Amino acid sequence: MRTRSMRRSGALAATALSALLVLAACGDDDGGDAAEEPTAEAEDFPEGSTMARLAEAGSITVGTKFDQPLFGLVGPDGTPVGFDVEIAKIIASELGISEDNIEWVETVSANREPFIQDGQVDIVVATYTINDERKQLVDFAGPYFIAGQTIMVLESNNDINGPDDLAGRRVCSVEGSTPAENIRTNYPEAELFPTGAYSDCLEPLRNGQVDAVTTDNVILSGFVDQNPGEFKLVGDPFTEEPYGIGLAHGDTEFRNWINDVLEESFEDGRWAEAWEETAGAVLETPEPPEVDRY
């Protein structure tokens, strides 16, 4: 059995709860989620804040990927599972929202900003790289993980060993993603084959329609693990991709609060637990990154 002290800092200092102890389940259980039992209520947050609104509603709408093993993949019951999903559950639990009251909305790379801007989702946790261009449209909390772009080819392919070998090759990636833009900008001799989702790249790779697939190493590692003997990763990561949580542009109070929650989860072990229950089945547990409080 374990207890943890929940802290409210930054924008919540004026309305902080002092030393709120949360009792986690102990003994025999189902393995559980990294998120603990929700305890917060609307009055715990500044009046008029996004946190108070969501806590009062008792629900949150989260955009995530539905086709990415390890991070966001729809399970047999129709509910997404993965590291991104567990991070969203941690945030929801700090708002007093149970996982049963999270509405999951499928987001692909091209619609993450529009979904946030139109209010179709409250947050997006979807292998979402923080960059300056996107910061003009939405805000980001985090990062909560640092990935890196790499390349996946057929197991039998020994001709492609890194990005410099992509010249004259057809390379599949997702339209609207930073890996696709990186290929367009920095490797123009490669022929980009854009799709709507990374899972849409698998069959073209199998049938020779494309020579390689490129995106973040953790996403491709999931596909390699899910399809043993078919694919492999080649070369080292050649970018850094800081994954953040997307939210409405200008909602600094909500962004600061999510950053507080992330840092707390780094310190109390919930972040590592979320990783080990999901991506940790394939990948070693990394150190949590430093949050960027821009």
Image (cartoon, rainbow, N blue to C red):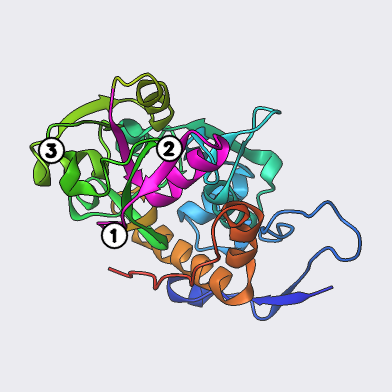
* Amino acid at pointer 2: Glu
Number of other residues with Cα within 10 Å of mark 3, as a class: few under 14, some 14 to 19, many 20 or more: some
Q: Which residues are magenta?
A: 210-239
Do we see residue 201 in this rendering? Answer: yes
Residue at the (67%, 58%) spot, across then down: 35
Q: Nearer the viewer, mark 2 or mark 1?
A: 2
Question: Is-magenta flag for residue 224?
Answer: yes
Q: Nearer the viewer, mark 3 or mark 2?
A: 2
In the depicted view, which residue is nearer to us: 160 or 247?
160
Q: Residue furthest bottom?
A: 19
Q: Nearer the viewer, mark 3 or mark 1?
A: 3
Q: Sequence order check: which comes first, mark 2 or mark 1?
A: 2
In the rendering, at what x and y percent does residue 293 appear?
33, 70
SS at badge 2: loop
In the rendering, at what x and y percent does residue 139 appear?
31, 53
- The answer to which image quadrant residue 20 occupies is bottom right
In the depicted view, which residue is nearer to us: 5 or 225?
225
Can you identify the residue that label 1 sits on?
240
Do we see residue 125 in this rendering? Answer: no
Q: Are marks 2 and 1 in contact (CB under 8 Å)?
A: no
In the rendered view, tell whether residue 93 sits above or below residue 267: above
Q: Are marks 3 and 2 in contact (CB under 8 Å)?
A: no
Question: Is-magenta flag for residue 36?
Answer: no
Can you identify the residue that label 2 sits on?
155
In the rendering, at what x and y percent does residue 198 appear?
39, 32
Residue at the (27%, 68%) spot, across then down: 294
- Which numbered disc covers residue 167? 3
| Gap in angstroms between the C-alphas marked 2 and 1 | 25 Å
| Gap in angstroms between the C-alphas marked 3 and 2 | 20 Å
